[in-house]
Image: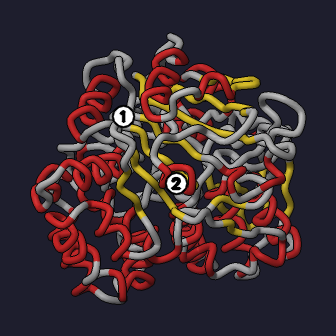
Amino acid sequence: MLDAVVVGAGPNGLTAAVELARRGFSVAVFEAKSTVGGGSRTAELTLPGFRHDPCAAAHPLGVNSPAFKAMPLERYGLEWLHAELPMAHPFPDGSAAVLSRSVGETAASFGPRDAGAYRRLVEPFLPKWDTLARDFMSLPLSALPRDPVTLARFGLVGLPPSTWLMRRFKDERAKALFAGLVAHVIAPLGGLATGAVGLVFALAAHAAGWPVARGGSQSIADALTAYLKDLGGAVHTDYEVKRLDDLPPARAYVFDTSPTALARIAGLGGYYEPYRYGASVFKLDYALDGPVPWTAPEARLAGTVQVGASRAEIGTALDAASRHGRAPDRPFLITVQPSLVDPSRAPEGKHAFWAYGHVPNGWTGDLTDAVERQLERFAPGFRDRVLARATAGPPELAAHNANYVGGDIACGAASGLQLLLRPKLSLTPYGTPHPAVFLCSSATPPGPGVHGMSGHNAAKAVWRRLRQEP
């Protein structure tokens, strides 16, 4: 009998398996797809030689992950590559605010009226970032805070809505950039703890950047898999699990799946019925005949570029997709340009490029024209650079990854109390009514992102239980 079986070979499932194997437990992973990766995959989606990331592409939480930092993943081929700027936020007039590794450079890009306010916001937390990140990403109750005072101070700043935090700023540049940071979790700007979301992304950039993985996001999953195998774990692909009886006998079963899939497989009935899935995205991967012709010079140097003219425009786009059930006329875009720093992503002289805008859950329309009209506002001539494009709306995203219910790439709405209390109000969010069944996906704290911390935290709950058994 195995000690643990993990269902799903995404970053969280693989991290949970590694954490258990490192502690001497026998582990096997079962994945329905033909390759490991989940939200961390790479494929030639457009033309030969163009390597795209179907899901996550830039990894501010990955390079800052306490779980990944504790593993020798560089031995297994994981290398982080950094653009000159982690992120840029251009404006229609050709200028841009930036999120730089330097707090000073970032503050200066906001203008003199907001430079001091930004420094006062981030500088108290930055010297203690490593401890704060561990405390923040280990909650709730998977570990005692190492610095409860700093964590409490962070909570006072971050728990209110981001709209409150943005009152610190007087001009549009800082407000728009910060609104864009919040939008990465597809949360309306006025939601609970959205201030913390924006602040975490900003601090992550200053501490360690917003890198891409050399060769594509698949290399993260591949490194975790190789490390797991060296620890004695096994990985089985093309193995769909429909019920617990499909799996070999084990002392514990750990699911890197949506809560509803776990309930169906484990026979938990309506236990997760109140869990809400959020808005989706419409994603485009491009093969380009040259770099994106951004008007703002800063955007040409940034790994990630946020595209939204103002805080109001960003908020309107988020509300349309999240609250009003319609696609926005001017979508807020998150874009990534990995071939700026990784020549393996595209043939010489060409570029791979990635963009998405927000749409309602399960939406079946085509946002391509709206996305490209928005890109042309900030990069005139963009369409002339397009050699090929691959599109994926909510149905295609859900088919690619079953955790993306209705195309929700966060595996559950990251808004309201559910941003903090995932998948439901519980002191043991990784446990279930079945004593041998656990959940470790992005539906558990700390939530979405390629960081492995949900798997890390769930593994703690599993090994504590296994050690209690006779």
Numbered badge on residue 429: none
- Residue visible at 35% across and 42% down? 91
Q: Secondary structure at mark 1?
A: loop
Residue at image position (62%, 49%) is 57
Q: Residue at x 82, y 36 (%)?
A: 44
Residue at the farthest top position: 365
Q: Nearer the viewer, residue 305 or 67?
A: 305
Amino acid carrying label 1: it is Arg
> In x, y percent, where is residue 404?
55, 34
Inspect this view and state whether residue 191 appears.
yes
Q: Give the mark nearest the N terminus, 1 or 2.
A: 1
Query: Quadrant of residue 272 in the image?
Result: top left
**As drawn, is 300 to the left or to the right of 286?**
left
Out of 320 and 370, give the one closest to the viewer: 370
Q: Which residue is mark 2?
A: 449
Which is more toward the observer, 234 or 313?
313
Mark 1 to mark 2: distance in Å? 18 Å
Q: Which residue is mark 1?
A: 276
Kind of residue sitting beneath label 2: Gly
Q: Secondary structure at mark 2?
A: loop
* Image quadrant containing the C terminus: bottom right
In front here: 434 or 31? Answer: 31
Front label number (1 vs 2): 2
Q: Residues within 10 Å of mark 1 (few under 14, many from 20)?
A: some
Q: Quadrant of residue 289?
A: top right
